[in-house]
Image (tube, coloured by chain):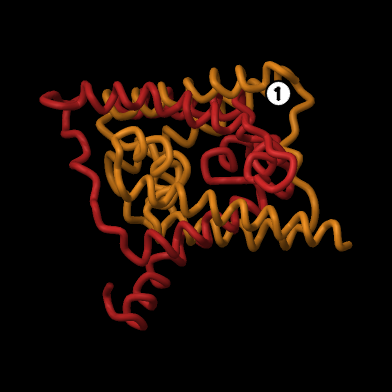
Chain colours: A red, B orange
Amino acid sequence: MRSGFAAIAGAVFGTGLWLSGMTDTTKVQGWLDVFGDWDPTLAFVMGGAIIPMVFAWRLTTGRRPALGGAFPGPPGQEIDRGLVIGSVLFGFGWGLSGLCPGPAVASLSWGGTEGIVFCLAMVAGMRAAPSVRTQLDARFRPV
Amino acid sequence: MPQEWLWGLAGGAMIGIAAALFLLVNGRVMGASGILGGLADGTTRGEAAREGMAFLVGLVGVPALIVLARGGESTHAGGHLALYIVAGLLVGLGTRLANGCTSGHGVCGISRLSVRGIVATVVYILAGAFAVLLLRQLTEAI
């Protein structure tokens, strides 16, 4: 049951990514090309995605998830080193390739060698993250 | 195409509805890097791992069927494979260090006015714009 709904969520997410143009690397890079030929489409994608979620978060107060368990706790407030360094690295890779994790996975079946190579490298980067985080923490004093 | 923004809005709404479903039914934050990363490094186990796997099956499978039926789809990814290795490593490492990507921080974080989500989104968009600027300069130079 839980996995069934997770699969539906994944399917709707993937279809939305494809329909919106997020799986087209030229559109993503066009959106990031603020000093060139800027493509505003992704602003509409972000806006369209955030609106249903604003209502969804409101519905969580005083309730429980439909299939039991608990909703995620309030978000952390701390702007730490990992958040900033990680987002810089992620953004740079996103700009270079036009791919972020969701669209990269969603387009696996038609993304060609580039898409598969990107996903394999991404998984390798994810697996390396815990040890990189430990090394960062050891080298620098906590902020 | 003039109606591209409309497709963007419609596709975006689907992304938001998927995230709302995953939150309200399963009680989980729909973050692509969190779901994939937790499975990749083994930190997600049991029930959550099964849900994560099912999510990925839907995420890969349904767009695959649509594109197979329609044909002619392309991500327009091209250029040197080394670029995709470097970019993939950066995206994988970065999203896990930052604990989220475009879906987790961008969609789920901003919609609940999470300070971390907003800061992360501003930072990765600036870094992405810088990378594209650099890429454009290099391509023009060649």
Q: Residue drawn at (62%, 29%), measured in percent from left and top? A: A41
Crowdedness of circle 1 by 10 Å Cα count: few (<14), some, many (20+)?
Answer: few
Question: What residue is at 69 percent from the left and 38 percent from the top?
Answer: A38
B17 shown above or below B38: above
Residue at the far front in the pictured view: A35
The image quadrant that residue B31 belongs to is top left
Residue located at (50% from left, 60% from top): A88
Horizontal side, residue B35 vs residue B79: left or right: left
Q: Which residue appears farthest toward the left when viewing the image? A: A62
Q: Secondary structure at mark 1?
A: helix
User: Residue A10, how many percent across, how many down?
Assistant: 46, 29
| Percent position of residue B131, x then y | 65, 57
The picture quadrant where one finds residue B20 is top left
Callout 1: chain: B
The answer to which of A60 and A80 lies nearer the viewer is: A80
Quadrant of the rendering where the N terminus of chain A is positioned: top left
The quarter of the displayed image where residue B40 is located = bottom left
Up the image or down, A28 lies above or below A4; here it is: below
Give the total number of marks visible in the rendering: 1
Position of the C terminus of chain A by quadrant: bottom left
Q: Nearer the viewer, residue A35 or A118?
A: A35
Residue at (68, 34) in percent of width and height: A39
State the residue position of label 1.
B68
Q: Amino acid at mark 1?
A: Leu
Residue A89: x %, y % from top left? 52, 61
Q: Is residue A120 above or below residue A13?
A: below
- Compared across the picture, whether A44 is left or right of B34 comes to right
Looking at the image, is A137 positioned above or below residue B33? below
Q: Position of residue A13 (x, y in %)?
A: 48, 28
Residue furthest toward the bottom?
A: A139
Q: In the image, is B63 to the left or to the right of A3? A: right
